[in-house]
């Protein structure tokens, strides 16, 4: 199946207007899901399912934090049986939240759980298939024989669900695709979609439709492409429009986990896709629901608050596969360069070297040198407050055009100019920088005259901005205009935000900019604030935070790897060690290894698969026993937990990928 021949508009109703995808309704314990209902919030317990009281207490905390469904792992029959005790305990205390049993490998557990809880989740990659990481050459007949085996194992569960009114999620995970799917379709979004459709077709044959679907991955590009392709395939096959459960697996913790979740989930919500959200953080589950709710609530009045955008009749990009927009190189923007980060210092008069520490540039008085860390910003926008000293070689200054025109240093500083003013400057042959000018452009300002000027300009980087609340759609429309007019200047995505809660900033920026970057649109990013702050100290803190968010978005969208990436699961009842503590310990010792991906998985059930694209893996295989992986290959099978981090580092050293962290000078 060719993904290049698919209609790029088939996965959503509109690329310019917020329109929620229309779906059927699935009843889950009296809390219905689908387009006729609010987008639901859910999460998953981390307490051992056999700890009845601990599970009840945690579920209550999750409900109070905003969860409308709660998922509990049932890896074997004994956990499935104990779901009844947990449910009875909750109902006795007046809590009616629908419970979801999470099933892997064990049809018997699924069949038992379906008689107890309101919904079961099965993973088509391991419900009926065995995974041995083998490539198998199937004929059509032998492949069909495998599907017949799946049907034989799956039909009993479907019949029970029909009898008891139990809903089901068919949840594909990128990292746990079966050998059969991988052998035929490869490690691809198409393989993820087909994995779910094989099970869905069986359910449809039995006239069972209380189904929710998901396409989860720790790779945000793959995740977004798979969901889009799923929507397209459901329509193409004439299947029902089933509700979709959105989530990025193993997003991690803290700001990085929130940004990664927002890049994946927010991109789909922008296009009206998604009926329930689970944010997977390596934190207690009650911290996940508020993040999910923040992402969802942006769309409650989106149609009422957004400015109308001219509709798109055709799309110049392929939404099912990543291809970066073609650009010509300007300085170190565009072409084959990684996207650049611009730090907004417009409200800060930079008067001493210490002012740049927050954006990754450190001055060492002795021996009178600068050092830059992995989050060292590439450009500093000083607005109308030029920096009063020479900047380090790794940092260039941008200033407002009228200031630049009178500035004594014009070679190593670059002008920031509004589009209309730039057109006048060209027409009147006013002074501009010979190699790099930042032209602030909106969809509204991109008129025929500017397009004509840009066709001949080789020294311009565009700065795309919008005030529209439907920001991603308007900026995407701007990129489409550039592509269709063969304008190849690099583009910096600028997003400015007001006085909303600081915790919302990474989520909103990751959605608005990350959704563009995932589609190959954007050669730089600048996160700004529309209003000033109370003090200079606050302004410096905000600038540092915005810089960190910008780098985090590029990493989450997989367009610039600037730091170590941790693919860590949210702990659940299967976890065999303290996942949060272990993740923090591994991060402390390895977070200087730029570009390396480390998977930290609580158990063997999903571990090897879910860290599919990690360079190294740390997986629980028994109490206080760890397996260490290089890619998908297990290197050490049963390492005592107290030695496992040292052994992991030894493995990295064997591959000559280890280096010692730089010592931080005491004078910094």
Image (tube, grey):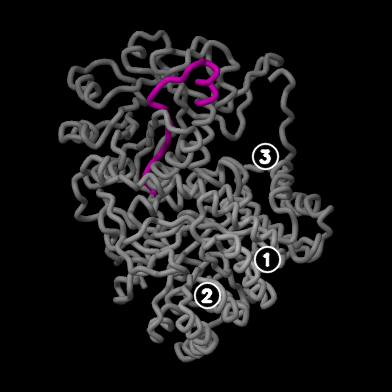
Does label 1 or label 3 sit earlier along the sequence? 1
- What x and y, as percent, mark residue 637? 78, 66
Using the rendered image of the protein, determine whether residue 615 is visible from the camera's viewpoint: no
- What x and y, as percent, mark residue 174? 52, 65
Does label 1 or label 2 sit earlier along the sequence? 1
Which of pointers 1 and 3 indicates the residue nearer the eye? Answer: 1
The residue indicated by pointer 1 is 49
Q: CA distance from mark 1 to mark 3?
A: 36 Å
Q: Residue at x 51, y 46 (%)?
A: 290
Q: Residue at x 41, y 86 (%)?
A: 206
Mark 3: few, some, or many residues within 10 Å (few <14, many ≥20)? some
Decide whether residue 504 is among the magenta residues. Answer: no
Circle 2 sits in a helix, a strand or a loop, which is it?
loop
Circle 1 sits in a helix, a strand or a loop, which is it?
loop
Task: Please say if 428 is above or below 480.
Answer: above
> Is 401 or 32 nearer to us in this picture?
32
* Segment tinted magenta in the rendering: 520-542
The residue indicated by pointer 2 is 124
- What x and y, as percent, mark residue 471? 32, 40
Task: Please say if 237 is above or below 13.
Answer: below
Q: The C terminus is located in which quarter?
A: top right
Mark 1: few, some, or many residues within 10 Å (few <14, many ≥20)? many
Q: In the visual, does 326 lie left or right of 189?
A: left
The residue indicated by pointer 3 is 592
């Amino acid at each position: 199946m060719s993904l290049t021949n698919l209609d790029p508009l088939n996965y959503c109703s509109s690329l310019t207007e917020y329109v929620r995808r229309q779906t059927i309704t699935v009843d889950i314990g009296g809390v219905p899901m689908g387009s006729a209902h609010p987008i639901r919030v859910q999460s998953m317990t981390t307490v051992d399912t056999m700890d009845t009281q601990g599970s009840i207490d945690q579920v209550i905390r999750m409900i109070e934090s905003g969860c409308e469904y709660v998922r509990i792992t049932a890896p074997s029959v004994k956990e499935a049986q104990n779901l009844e005790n947990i449910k009875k305990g909750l109902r006795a205390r007046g809590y009616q939240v629908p419970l979801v049993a999470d099933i892997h490998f064990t049809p018997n557990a699924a069949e038992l759980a379906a008689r107890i809880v309101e919904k079961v989740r099965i993973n088509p990659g391991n419900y009926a298939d065995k995974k041995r990481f083998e490539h198998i050459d199937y004929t059509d007949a032998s492949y069909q024989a495998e599907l017949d085996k799946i049907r034989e194992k799956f039909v009993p569960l479907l019949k029970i669900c029909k009898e008891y009114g139990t809903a089901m999620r068919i949840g594909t995970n990128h990292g746990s695709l079966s050998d059969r799917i991988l052998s035929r379709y490869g490690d691809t979004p198409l393989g993820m979609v087909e994995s779910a459709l094989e099970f869905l077709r069986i359910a449809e044959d039995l006239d069972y439709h209380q189904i929710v679907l998901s396409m989860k991955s720790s790779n945000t590009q793959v995740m977004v492409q798979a969901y889009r392709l799923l929507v397209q395939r459901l329509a193409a096959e004439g299947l029902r429009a089933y509700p979709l459960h959105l989530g990025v697996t193993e997003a991690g913790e803290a700001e990085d986990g929130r940004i990664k979740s927002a890049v994946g989930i927010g991109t789909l919500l922008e296009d009206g896709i998604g009926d329930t959200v689970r944010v997977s953080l390596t934190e207690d589950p009650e911290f996940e629901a508020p993040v999910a709710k923040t992402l969802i609530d942006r769309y409650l009045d989106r149609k009422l608050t957004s400015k109308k955008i001219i509709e798109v009749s055709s799309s110049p990009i392929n939404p099912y596969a990543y291809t970066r927009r073609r650009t010509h190189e300007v300085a170190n923007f565009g072409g084959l360069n990684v996207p650049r980060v611009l730090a907004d210092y417009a409200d800060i008069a930079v008067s001493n070297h210490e002012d740049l520490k927050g954006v990754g540039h450190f001055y060492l008085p002795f021996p009178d040198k600068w050092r830059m860390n992995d989050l060292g910003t590439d450009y500093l926008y000083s607005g109308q407050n030029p920096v009063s000293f020479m900047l380090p070689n790794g940092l260039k200054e941008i200033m407002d055009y009228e200031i630049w025109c009178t500035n004594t240093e014009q070679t190593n500083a670059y002008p920031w100019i509004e589009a209309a003013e730039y057109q006048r400057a060209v027409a009147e042959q006013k002074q501009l920088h010979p190699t790099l000018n930042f032209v602030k452009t909106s969809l509204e300002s991109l008129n025929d005259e500017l397009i004509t000027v840009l066709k001949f300009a080789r020294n311009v980087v565009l700065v795309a901005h919008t005030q529209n609340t439907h920001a991603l759609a308007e900026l995407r429309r701007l990129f489409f205009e550039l592509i269709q007019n063969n304008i190849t200047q690099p583009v910096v995505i600028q997003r400015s935000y007001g006085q909303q809660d600081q915790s919302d900033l990474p989520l909103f920026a990751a959605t608005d900019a990350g959704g563009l970057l995932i589609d190959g649109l954007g050669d730089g990013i600048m996160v700004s604030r529309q209003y000033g702050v109370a003090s200079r100290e606050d302004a410096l803190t905000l600038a540092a935070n915005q810089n960190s968010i910008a780098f985090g978005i590029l990493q989450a969208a997989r367009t610039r790897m600037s730091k170590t990436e941790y693919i860590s699961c949210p702990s659940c009842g299967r976890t065999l060690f303290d996942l949060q503590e272990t993740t923090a310990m591994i991060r402390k010792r390895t977070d200087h290894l730029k570009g390396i991906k480390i998977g930290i998985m609580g158990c063997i059930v999903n571990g090897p698969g879910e860290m599919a694209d990690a360079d190294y893996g740390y997986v629980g295989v028994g109490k206080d026993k760890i397996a260490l992986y290089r890619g998908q290959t297990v290197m050490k099978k049963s390492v005592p937990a107290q030695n496992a981090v040292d052994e992991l580092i030894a493995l990295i050293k064997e591959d000559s990928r280890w280096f010692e962290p730089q010592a931080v000078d005491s004078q910094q």
